[in-house]
């Protein structure tokens, strides 16, 4: 899904209303059983009724999201999340030629970057761009590190470093470092 919808729309509101009505009907019809049951069992029954009441709306949202996302072209599908964080989809493209297909990589972003959503989206952009390479959490255990706005040597001991995207305006450089073994 590209972004959070501003409002559920008429169909969404109708399904939410239907869910609320179903939840209230379930609670009214099961109130004696719920009251007589031990507290954990009663709470579980209420949670189950609420979950079942939410299923029509959740299923409809999945269908609506799939209706939109399955029509995206390759670029739009690849860059949808990072683009929403104002990250250009090509930011990490140059890393592909330096990281072999069977290698692992970790990402690091400078905490000095002023755009928190972009900092948070950079690992996703790298994962999408570098797939099927495997992303790992620990930079020291990775074969390579992909960094944005921070030198790879500050993240892990590196044997070699490449600038895969030079600084451009407000966007700092993107680097790939081969972790020293």
Image: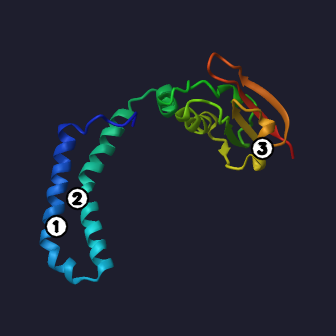
Distance CA(mark 2)–CA(mark 1): 9 Å
Distance CA(mark 3)–CA(mark 2): 47 Å
User: Where on the picture, by quarter, is residue 112?
Assistant: top right
Q: Secondary structure at mark 2?
A: helix
Residue 26 circle label: 1
- State left or right for residue 27 relative to residue 148: left
Residue 54 circle label: none
Percent coordinates x, y for residue 73 in the rendering: 45, 26
Distance CA(mark 3)–CA(mark 1): 55 Å
Between discs 3 and 1, the one toward the N terminus: 1
- Residue at the image position 56 percent from the left and 38 percent from the top: 120
Between discs 2 and 1, the one toward the N terminus: 1
> Could you say which is closer to the camera, residue 181 or residue 115?
115
Between discs 3 and 2, the one toward the N terminus: 2
Residue 143 circle label: 3
Q: Which residue is mark 2?
A: 53
Percent coordinates x, y for residue 22 in the rendering: 16, 60
Q: Secondary structure at mark 3?
A: loop
Image quarter (top left, top right, bottom left or bottom right) of the N terminus: top left
- Residue at the image position 67 percent from the left and 49 percent from the top: 137
- Residue at the image position 78 percent from the left and 35 percent from the top: 177
In front: mark 3 or mark 2? 2
Tag 3–tag 2 contact (CB < 8 Å):
no
Tag 2–tag 1 contact (CB < 8 Å):
yes
Percent coordinates x, y for residue 36 in the rendering: 20, 83
- State left or right for residue 33 relative to residue 130: left
């Amino acid at each position: 899904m590209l972004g959070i919808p501003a409002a559920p729309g008429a169909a969404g509101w109708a399904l939410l209303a239907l869910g609320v009505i179903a939840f209230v009907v379930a609670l009214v019809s099961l109130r004696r059983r719920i009251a007589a049951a031990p507290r954990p069992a009663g709470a579980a029954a209420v949670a189950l009724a609420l979950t079942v009441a939410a299923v029509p709306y959740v299923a409809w949202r999945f269908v609506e999201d799939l209706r939109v996302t399955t029509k995206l072209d390759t670029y739009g599908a690849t860059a949808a999340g990072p683009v929403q964080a104002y990250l250009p989809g090509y930011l990490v493209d140059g890393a592909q030629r330096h990281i072999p297909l069977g290698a692992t990589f970790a990402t690091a972003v400078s905490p000095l970057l002023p755009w928190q959503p972009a900092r948070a989206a950079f690992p996703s952009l790298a994962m999408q761009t570098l797939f099927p390479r495997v992303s790992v959490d620990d930079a020291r255990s990775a074969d390579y590190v992909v960094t944005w706005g921070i030198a790879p040597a500050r993240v892990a001991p590196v044997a070699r470093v490449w600038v895969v995207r030079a600084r451009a305006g407000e966007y700092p450089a993107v680097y790939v470092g081969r972790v020293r073994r």
